[in-house]
Amino acid sequence: MKNRIKLIFLGTFFVIIICLLVYTIRRTPKCNRVHIDEMIAFGVPDEEVARKIADVVVGIGEEKIYDVTVHFDKESDEWIITYLPKRSSKDDKLSGQKVVKIRKDIGTISVFEN
């Protein structure tokens, strides 16, 4: 009798698990957010691509009012793009400096403004 009850509970348990698995697999998200399994990591292979991405992130158009330097930090595996505003005289303070860091392998972007 005990074995029969155990088999009934075990069978019910497996049926519930199978139903939940089917529901989870067939269910699609109803929101417009990007879910972790849909994220695509992109690599940034060279200096030119890093500069173009940083220009878009910072919002710099065709009118360049910044002196831009790009270098690669091997220790942190990041492209570091520094935007220094062009100054009219040497007495102007250095304000408006922007630094964009882009990870080469996964494309994570960090923006720092001064």
Image: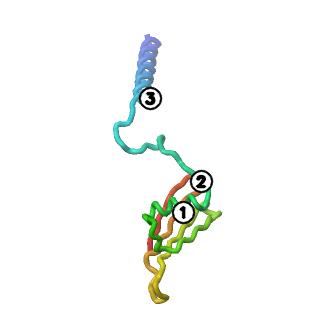
- Residue positioned 52% across, 74% down in the render: 67
Kind of residue indicated by mark 2: Asp
Q: Nearer the viewer, residue 49 or 35?
A: 49
* Quadrant where the image shows the N terminus: top left
Q: Does residue 90 appear left or right of residue 20 in this picture?
A: right
Q: Nearer the viewer, residue 29 or 4?
A: 29
Which numbered mark, 3 or 2, is in the foreground of this view? 2
Q: Position of residue 82 (x, y in %)?
A: 53, 70
Q: Residues within 10 Å of mark 3 (few under 14, many from 20)?
A: few
Question: What residue is disc 1 on?
Answer: 51
Q: Which mark is residue 105?
A: 2
In this picture, is 84 found above or below 12? below
- Residue positioned 38% across, 36% down in the render: 29
Question: What residue is disc 3 on?
Answer: 25
Q: Position of residue 88 (x, y in %)?
A: 46, 84
Q: Which secondary structure lies at badge 1? A: helix
Q: Which secondary structure lies at badge 3? A: helix
Which numbered mark, 2 or 1, is in the foreground of this view? 1
Q: Which secondary structure lies at badge 2? A: loop
Marks 3/1: CA distance? Answer: 41 Å
Marks 3/2: CA distance? Answer: 30 Å
Kind of residue indicated by mark 3: Ile
Q: Does residue 30 appear left or right of residue 81 in this picture?
A: left
- Residue positioned 46% across, 14% down in the render: 7
Q: Position of residue 10 (x, y in %)?
A: 45, 19
Q: Does residue 33 appear left or right of residue 69 in this picture?
A: left
Kind of residue indicated by mark 1: Arg
